[in-house]
Image: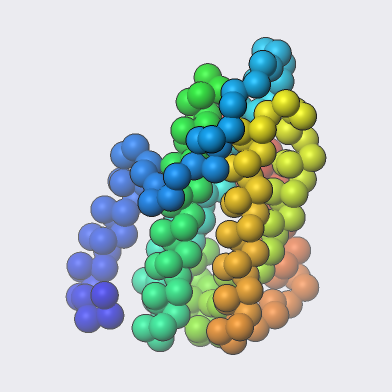
Amino acid sequence: MPNRSPVDQVLGVLDQTLRTLFAPAHSARQSPAAERPQAAMSDQERRLSADLMRVNHSGEIAAQALYEGQALVARDETLRQLLRQAAREEADHLAWTEGRIAELGGRKSLLNPLWYGAGVAMGVASGLLGDRWNLGFLAETERQVESHLESHLKQLPVSDDKSRAILEQMKQDEASHATAARRSGGEDLPAPVRFAMRCSGRVLTSLSRLL
């Protein structure tokens, strides 16, 4: 809320951190995988799908943190509400990927606390530059995530329709968030910033797949 004291805001961030990292994720929307049958998969295919979904789960951890950091310093209430709405949809993604990891017999990344802390820091940093840059950072983040999801859709085992349904809906949501941010006045980020964001995304992807 815009009139919360700094102490209340910090406590709110801490509360959200604990909920995101340690509480079971819940979604407002039914998982796109719910109506898809579980196809027969080899052990190798199951491990590949679990690894990919672990990476995407870590990305959603970082997204929750990013929106929390951006909303914390956003000057405009309309922007704050846009960020909160995007965060609620990303929370669905978090629950869907978490559930799918469990179905595949996989595990979540050990580095998720690191991704959350980095996400909050990046969100605050972008927000302090002003609302137009905050929106631009949001739009570029979602554009890069959309590209990342497209890559994972190509890597998934052909038989894994359940994971595919989740990633396709996530991709659609990310595109919607990016469009909303641009329409709300988001600035195009400089090329070096976009490059740095891609590099940080590759670090998250590589390390989350390993750890």
Residue at image location 79% in from the left, 40% down from the top:
154
- Which quadrant, please, contains the C terminus? top right
Relative to 143, does residue 19 appear above or below in the rendering? Answer: above
Total marks shown come to: 0
36 and 50: which one is in front?
36
**Horizontal arrangement in the rendering, residue 67 relative to residue 135 (left or right):** left
Residue at image location 50% in from the left, 83% down from the top:
131
Residue 38: image quadrant is top right
- Which quadrant, please, contains the N terminus? bottom left
Residue at image location 69% in from the left, 77% down from the top:
189
Can you see residue 191?
Answer: yes
Relative to 57, does residue 158 appear above or below in the rendering? Answer: above
Q: Name the spot of residue 136 as percent of width and height, x first.
A: 61, 77
Instruction: Tell me which colouring the rendered structure shows.
Output: rainbow
Relative to 67, does residue 162 appear above or below in the rendering? Answer: above
Q: Name the spot of residue 191 as percent of width and height, x first.
A: 77, 73
Can you see residue 136?
Answer: no
Relative to 15, does residue 57 appear above or below in the rendering? Answer: above
**Horizontal arrangement in the rendering, residue 137 relative to residue 119 (left or right):** right
Q: Name the spot of residue 180 as percent of width and height, x first.
A: 57, 76
Residue 159: image quadrant is top right
Q: Name the spot of residue 140 as percent of width and height, x first.
A: 66, 68
Residue 45: image quadrant is top right
Which residue in the rendered view is the most extreme toward the top?
43
